[in-house]
Structures are given as C-alpha cells and as structure tokens.
Amino acid sequence: MAKRGRPATGISQEKKRACRKRYYAKTSYLYSRHPWTEEECRLVLEHSIPDSELSEKLGRSLKGIQEKRRRLKKSNQNTD
C-alpha cells in the first residue's frame, strides 16, 4: 500500500487502472451525444441517487456525469 501523499507504484497502480477502466467501460460509448438540459444539470448537482442509476436514467455515461458535475461546480464557484 502506498503511503499517504505518494503516488501508487507497481502492481497497485496497475490494479487501480484496470478497476477504473472496468468501471467506466460499463457506460462509455453506450449513449449518443446530446445537449444537457436544465433538468439534467439539476439532477447532476443534486447527487441524490448514485451515478450508476443516474446514468441509466439520463442516458449519459458515468464519466460524462462526473465531468459535468465538476464543470457545473467550478462555474458556480467562479460566479460567486
């Protein structure tokens, strides 16, 4: 196990990468690209249900939902 503050090396880093790849592969490229609606943005920011369920409900990838949430939060910080 890597110490806190240091990057993981060797086998643990490879395992993390493989796990992440499996996780995002479940929904990547399953859905076509389309503009985000206000309702979708609201649901993403609420974060009231797990992203995996939200992905199915919205027809968006897990990574797409997480990236949209990050961008919405960042834009909200810039406007405050």
Image (tube, grey):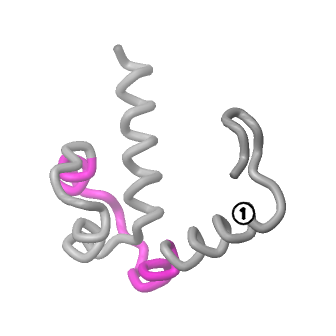
In the rendered structure, the answer to whether residue 7 lies left or right of residue 40 reads right
In the rendered structure, the answer to whether residue 32 lies left or right of residue 52 reads right
For label 1, count other residues whose C-alpha is less than 10 Å away and answer few (under 14), some (14-19) or many (20+): few
Residue at x 23%, y 70% (from the top left corner): 53
Q: Quadrant of residue 40?
A: bottom left
Q: Position of residue 39 (x, y in %)?
A: 16, 53
Residue at x 58%, y 72% (from the top left corner): 19
Q: Quadrant of residue 16?
A: bottom right
Indicate whether 60 appears above or below 72: below
In the rendered structure, the answer to whether residue 66 lies left or right of residue 47 reads right
Q: Is residue 25 magenta?
A: yes
Indicate whether 13 appears above or below 41: below
Farthest residue to the bottom: give it: 30
Q: Position of residue 6 (x, y in %)?
A: 76, 38
Residue at x 37%, y 19% (from the top left corner): 79
Q: Which of these two is toward me, 22 or 72? A: 22
Range shown magenta:
24-44
Q: Position of residue 36 (x, y in %)?
A: 31, 58
Give the residue pinned by disc 1: 12
Farthest residue to the right: give it: 10
Indicate whether 28 appears above or below 69: below
Q: Quadrant of residue 57?
A: bottom left
Q: How many marks?
A: 1
Query: Which quarter of the rendering shows the C terminus?
Result: top left
Q: Which of these two is toward me, 22 or 79? A: 22
Amino acid type of disc 1? Answer: Ser
In the rendered structure, the answer to whether residue 15 lies left or right of residue 20 reads right
- SS assignment at label 1: helix
Farthest residue to the top: give it: 80
Residue at x 44%, y 62% (from the top left corner): 64
